Amino acid sequence: MSKLTQAEQDSLIEAQQTHTAEAGNPNTAKKKLSSIFPSYARYDLSLVKGKGSWVWDDKGNKYLDFTCGLAVTSLGHAPEKVGAKLKEQIDTLWHVSNLFHIPGQDKVAELLTDNSCADQVFFCNSGAEANEAAIKLARRYHQKVKGADRYEVITFEQSFHGRTLATLTATGQAKVKEGFLPLPAGFKTVPLYDLPALEAAIGEHTAAIMIEMILAEGGVLVVEPEFLHAVAQLCKDKGLLLIIDEVQTGMGRTGKLFAHQHYDLEPDIFTLAKGVASGFPAGVMLGKGYLREAFSPGSHATTFGGTPLAAAVMAATIETMLEDELPQRAAEMGEYLTGLLKEKLADCSFVIDIRGKGLLIGIECQTPVSDIVLAGQKRGLLFVNAGPNVLRLLPNLYVSTEEIDQAVDILSELIHTYAKQVNGEASS
Ligand SMILES: *Cc1c(COP(=O)(O)O)cnc(C)c1O
């Protein structure tokens, strides 16, 4: 990101002080800039249409999408069954306040609780909000139900939990906190796999431990079962709640409906968002029955949580996933994709590791990979990185073997070519 010159800064400060639109408004400067805050580092691509595994840009170019809105459009773009339910609901009722019963919510809650260890759900609009609700529930459970002065949440380095003040504080990455001080109190972060550090961090005020099953943003790090079971045991021994952030891993992508179902354990709370509504904004916080009374009437709320529209899309998404056995499909396709990658990249020492679960896959490389991501776009394949050195593949759960073959051919060629450039490495 470019730093402002002193003159530009002075001009902005003057504009702020005088409230004139002129001096600091980028649109009045010679170079016409976007009216959208530049908080996103965007690729030079405008996507305007999507169907299944494919998206099109505004120039009519077609791309095979192994990004899926970052694990959001798990049923592919514009899924017809879900679209039909959305259209039906658009003609029926869009929004009513949560002051009233919303029957669509009961259906989604039943689908989620019937297929998980959770008994209670809270509907919201995003992953950060679902985690925020989880943190609030943990605090309120200890303080109101148990009468304990517990509020602290322990999280792990390299984790990602969202961008609200509380969830960015919970996040174990310094870059998301820059310039946002002071941060809210009540959070501690310890290194992943450092059990002594975790035990030392637990004190009389600790309320919960929050963890992802795969640290996706942190580089697609799959949490080792032994460590996770030790964390769960610590929670039991010390009376802490175990919160699992399934915002990215949730909804079938890893080969189970929820990633913690691979581990033979039950969290007290877990959170969903990305894959839960095929791209319609929605988040869910789910918890065990014994937490119910902590969220007594008036304690927590949001205007848009579980609107009739959102509920219709969530129900259709989850029903489709279950009917078409998409978790199973994700497991099979993930195995196929990972196997093929390992085969095609076996001779490439530039690739350090290929890992993940189901269709959440990371390829760790020796150097930063952003140029490979850009080269992929030129070849008609969309994927992203996860941290500087890891390529991340997130195809939709209906992805075909032909599409996987096509993607791996392109990827393998791109990685071999790039490896040659950086290492002068001999590759076939
Ligand atoms: C994306 C993500 C979040 C934040 O979700 P938003 O909907 O962007 O607020 C939180 N946790 C994890 C693991 C995520 O991947």
Image: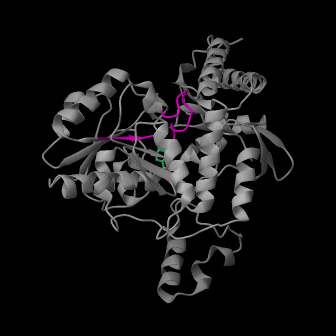
Task: Characterize the magenta stretch by its predominant secondary structure.
Answer: loop
Q: Is residue 423 magenta?
A: no
Query: Which quadrant, please, contains the N terminus?
Result: bottom right
Quarter holding residue 221: top left
- Residue depicted at 47% across the width and 50% down the height: 284
Spot occupied by residue 77 in the image (x, y as percentages of width and height): 73, 44
**Outermost residue, right side:** 60
Task: Determine the residue positioned at 72% across, 34% down.
Answer: 376
Whether residue 280 is visible, yes or no, is: no
> Which residues are drawn in magenta?
242-258
How far across and down, in percent of the image, does residue 390 sit?
54, 31
Q: Quadrant of the C terminus?
A: top right
Give the number of marks.
Answer: 0
Q: Looking at this view, is 127 or 44 the one in front?
A: 127
Tell me if residue 253 comes above or below residue 291 in the rendering: above
Q: Please name whichever residue, 80 or 157, is drawn nearer the observer in this view of the structure.
A: 80
Q: Position of residue 338 (x, y in %)?
A: 61, 19
Compared across the picture, whether 382 is left or right of 9 comes to right
* Residue at screen point 34% across, 49% down: 170
Up/down of 240 relative to 177, above or below: above
* Location of residue 17 in the rendering, given as x and y in whole percent from the top left corner: 47, 85
Residue at point 33%, 28% (across, down): 228
Residue 354 vs residue 279, the one in the foreground: 279
Identify whether 56 is placed above or below 211: below
Q: Is residue 138 left or right of residue 285?
A: left
Residue 99 visible to the viewer? yes
Residue nearer the viewer, 1 or 51: 51
- Verify whether residue 253 appears in magenta: yes
